[in-house]
Image (cartoon, helix red, strand yellow):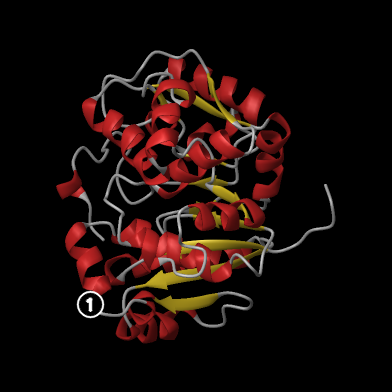
């Protein structure tokens, strides 16, 4: 790998998750990760409150989202329940000129040891592909389909027909959502948001997951693809990698298959480190394994 350079982590959070955000920061410091953590909060009062808890952020920062949106926009994003996606795109837009690679993560992440997301991203960049599997649950199909509309009608048709093979392939959270700054900039420009991120944010819904939109852009304009792993669709809400449990042999087998081919930087169940040696992070640590979001009303901004 080339000489280490800092990667930006864009982490939306809010007052109820400050404990998670502190734990994430402590893990980054303990394991000396080569990242700058940028937290995106709602308003200045939250920023001030978390600043007192967070201490020195080094190259990181605290971003008050409300201060970047005029005319009551942030309140509208809260009402539309698109706020988490808005916070991520705002952070990416503000920071893309400072970093070659940027990641979006939730604050409920736990750092399990030292590592570097560039290693797993390099696997995907070399193959120009994201591992994906089929989904059938209507809620999941809506998450597959919704971001496609943002790229325009002709591109939407291509995404739903070719890229996702009829709206069935899903690659959300297969690894840490990672963005190359130059590609990200081109995506914002395509969306008309090159100089004003609100052009995109005003169109977002809860279902417009940030990295799914980026994956689609890469597949349609940068020679990437979704690679079908051939796994059956889960019968419940969630991607397989969100559902894997070390207690089930079939989950361990699929996790080991994913690890062998794609070297992901994270797992949901930390006990899977024995079969996913590339992982150094654990996601969704705010809720018990098997408890997945099933509807928009479950979401807390």
| Residue sitting at x 37%, y 46% | 150
201 vs 241, left or right, is left
125 vs 142, left or right, is right
Residue 234 location, x and y as percent?
Answer: 33, 20
Residue 83 location, x and y as percent?
Answer: 29, 61
Residue 82 location, x and y as percent?
Answer: 28, 57
Residue closer to the observer: 156 or 296: 156
In the rendered view, tell whether residue 234 sits above or below residue 21: above
| Residue sitting at x 34%, y 85% | 44
- Please identify the quarter of the rendering in which residue 168 is found: top left
| Residue sitting at x 84%, y 52% | 2
Residue closer to the observer: 12 or 255: 12
Q: Which residue is mark 1?
A: 72
In the rendered view, tell whether residue 154 sits above or below residue 210: above
| Residue sitting at x 44%, y 60% | 89
* Badge 1 element: loop
């Amino acid at each position: 790998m080339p000489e280490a350079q800092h990667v930006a982590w864009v982490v939306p959070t809010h007052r109820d998750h400050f404990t998670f955000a502190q734990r994430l920061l402590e893990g980054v410091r303990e394991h000396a990760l080569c990242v700058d953590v940028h937290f995106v909060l709602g308003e200045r009062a939250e920023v001030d409150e978390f600043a007192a808890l967070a201490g020195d952020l080094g190259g990181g920062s605290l971003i008050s989202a409300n201060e970047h949106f005029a005319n009551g926009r942030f309140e509208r994003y809260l009402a539309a329940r698109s706020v988490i996606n808005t916070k991520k795109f705002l952070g990416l837009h503000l920071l893309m000129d400072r970093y070659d690679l940027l990641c979006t993560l939730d604050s409920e992440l736990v750092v399990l040891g030292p590592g570097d997301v560039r290693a797993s991203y390099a696997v995907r960049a070399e193959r120009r592909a994201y591992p994906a599997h089929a989904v059938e649950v209507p809620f999941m199909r809506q998450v597959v389909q919704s971001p496609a509309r943002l790229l325009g009608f002709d591109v939407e048709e291509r995404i739903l027909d070719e890229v996702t093979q009829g709206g069935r392939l899903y690659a959300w959270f297969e690894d840490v959502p990672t963005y190359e700054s130059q590609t990200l900039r081109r995506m914002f420009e395509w969306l008309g948001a090159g100089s004003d991120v609100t052009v995109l944010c005003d169109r977002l819904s809860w279902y417009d997951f940030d990295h799914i939109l980026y994956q689609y852009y890469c597949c349609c304009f940068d020679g990437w693809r979704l690679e079908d792993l051939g796994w059956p669709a889960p019968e419940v809400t969630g991607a397989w990698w969100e559902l894997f449990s070390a207690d089930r042999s079939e989950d361990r087998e699929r996790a080991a298959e994913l690890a062998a081919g794609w070297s992901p930087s994270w797992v949901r169940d930390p006990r899977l480190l024995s079969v996913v040696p590339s992982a150094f992070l654990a996601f969704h640590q705010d809720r018990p394994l098997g408890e997945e979001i099933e509807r928009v009303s479950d979401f807390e901004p």
